Image: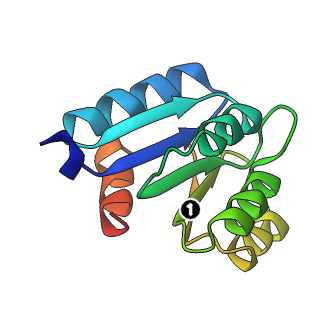
């Protein structure tokens, strides 16, 4: 029944966090795919992979998470995207929300259960 499982794309250059989130979401019964850059995320999207939710870090090497959000929303306006960052910036928060992010999460997370409670709302 894998075709009925929800799919999440996680974009974060922190390899340890990315691995932890992918494993945790898998345990929650979600198909999670992790990539380390906006360019890698674009490749996945351009290949036609569909996701119920994308979780994108704001600070990425190369193309920023906000720029990736803009690209994603141009290609698929209905795509739900949560942005996250370890560097709180009111400007980035407002820009991300204006560009269509459904939620803005500040890292580090208090717990995996906390981030799951937010993610689950949008699946």
Is residue 41 rendered to the left or right of residue 59? left
* Residue 39, quarter of the rendered image: top right
* Residue 95, position as x, y percentages in the image: 80, 71
* Residue 120, position as x, y percentages in the image: 30, 61
* Residue 42, position as x, y percentages in the image: 70, 41
Q: Residue furthest bottom?
A: 98
Look at 85% across and 42% down and name the residue there. Answer: 63
Asked whether residue 5 appears in the rendered view, the answer is yes
Q: Is residue 110 above or below residue 91?
A: above
Seen from the viewer's position, the closer of residues 6 and 86 is: 6
Which quadrant: the C terminus? Answer: bottom left
Q: Residue furthest left?
A: 1
Q: Is residue 93 above or below residue 116?
A: below
- The type of colouring in the image is rainbow
Look at 66% across and 74% down and name the residue there. Answer: 100
Which quadrant: the N terminus? Answer: top left
How many numbered marks does the figure carry? 1
Is residue 6 rendered to the left or right of residue 83? left
Q: Is residue 14 above or below residue 91?
A: above
Is residue 38 rendered to the left or right of residue 8? right
**Circle 1 residue:** 81
Asked whether residue 108 appears in the rendered view, the answer is no
Residue at disc 1, secondary structure: strand
Look at 65% across and 39% down and name the residue there. Answer: 41
Q: Residue furthest front?
A: 48
For label 1, count other residues whose C-alpha is less than 10 Å away and answer few (under 14), some (14-19) or many (20+).
many
């Amino acid at each position: 029944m894998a075709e009925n499982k929800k799919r999440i794309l996680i974009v974060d250059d922190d390899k340890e966090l990315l691995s932890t989130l992918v494993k945790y979401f898998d345990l929650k019964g979600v198909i999670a795919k992790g990539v380390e850059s906006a360019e890698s995320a674009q490749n996945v999207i351009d290949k036609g992979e569909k996701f119920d939710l994308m979780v994108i870090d704001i600070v990425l090497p190369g193309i920023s998470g906000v720029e990736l959000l803009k690209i994603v929303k141009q290609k698929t306006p209905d795509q739900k995207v949560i942005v996250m960052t370890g560097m709180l910036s009111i400007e980035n928060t407002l820009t991300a929300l204006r560009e269509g992010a459904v939620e803005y999460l500040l890292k580090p997370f208090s717990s995996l259960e906390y981030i799951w409670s937010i993610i689950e709302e949008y699946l």
